Amino acid sequence: KFGDGGGRSYEMSFKSDDEGRANATMSLMEPYIFRVKDTGKAAEYMPQEFVFMTDRPSFTSVVARTIFGSMPEKKIALVVDSSGSMASYLADVKAAMNLALVQQFNKSDRLFNIVTYTGKPRFFRKELVECTPSNIEDAMRFCEQIEAGGQSSMIQAIASALRLPGLEALYIVTDGKCDLGEEFLGRAKSHYFACAGRPRINTIGINCPPQRLTYRGLKALAMMTQSTFRAVCLEQDPGEPVGQILGPGGSLDTVLHNATTDEEGGGEDHGEDDGQF
């Protein structure tokens, strides 16, 4: 919200560019409110609001980005790194997965699966499944049971997930605490081109310093498959995995009953840049 100098305020809307930046002209030493509204749908940025004034000619605000954003594909596997280094982020990741299940999958015509990995991948189901209320509810329970521990074996998870029949896209969430060098990319390329469907491999890097090895490796993996790399910043503060979604005294049944979508259990072991304003 912007002041007009007469004690009144007015609201202006902005849309970020491809690099996640939006620019606005402001007056010095006047109060402003920055707000990202909660639309109840998949969004690029997390709902947030803060008040500020500035006496600087140029002012930059870094805005918290959502983990998954909007996922346009119809047949999707969410692949989550659950190794020991992810312990600090896992609560936020699980909450984001549950939110995606509610907002983007529940009661839609999509097919989905969830894969977690440490030393070996663990699948929610053996194949892609429909977004029925029972499957969504079971998937949310599967997410609640994810625990961090062990080493990260991303290449094995990629190889296993690519075998899912009909798959159109992977969304891999990781902090990249594994080898992402040339050997890794070479092996990933071999697995990818051996897959007839050639699904997109979208990568989501948590707290990866720009242009460092992890950042470059995840970005290269996404670019290799003509997909998207998404850099996300999270606080290292463990919390309730699904508390933000269920709320006090909430239940999975209540959430699924009240949820709306955009467009429209147990697991199984398989052996094998932020926006700126």
Image: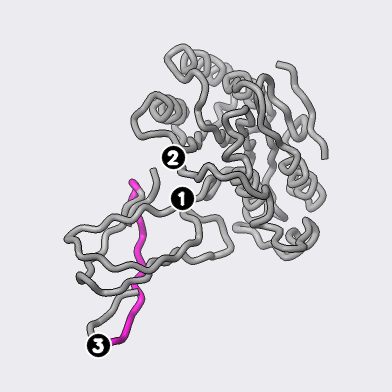
Q: Say which element carries label 3.
A: loop
Compared to residue 95, the image places residue 53 above or below, namely below
Foreground: 183 or 8?
8
Q: Which residue is mark 2?
A: 231
Residue 62 shown left or right of residue 125 in the figure = left
Q: Position of residue 48 (x, y in %)?
A: 47, 62
Residue farthest to the top?
Answer: 183
Q: Position of residue 63 (x, y in %)?
A: 40, 54
Q: Amino acid at mark 1?
A: Arg
* Scheme of image coloration: one colour
Compared to residue 44, the image places residue 152 above or below, namely above
Q: Position of residue 155 (x, y in %)?
A: 57, 19
Q: Which residue is mark 1?
A: 65
**In which quarter of the view is residue 123 placed?**
top right
Residue 224 appears anywhere in the view? no
Residue 41 appears anywhere in the view? yes
Residue appearing at x 71%, y 58% in the figure? 246
Is residue 155 rendered magenta in the image?
no
Foreground: 163 or 12?
12
Residue appearing at x 73%, y 48% in the figure? 131
Q: Amino acid at mark 2?
A: Ala
Estimate how packed mark 1 is, as few (under 14), some (14 to 19) or many (20 or more) residues with alpha carbons within 10 Å: many
Q: Say which element carries label 2.
A: strand
Compared to residue 221, the image places residue 94 above or below, namely below
Q: Amino acid at mark 3?
A: Gly
Q: Say which element carries label 1.
A: loop
Q: Which residues are magenta?
A: 6-19
Residues at discs 2 and 1 in contact (Cβ within 8 Å): yes
Q: Which residue is mark 3?
A: 6
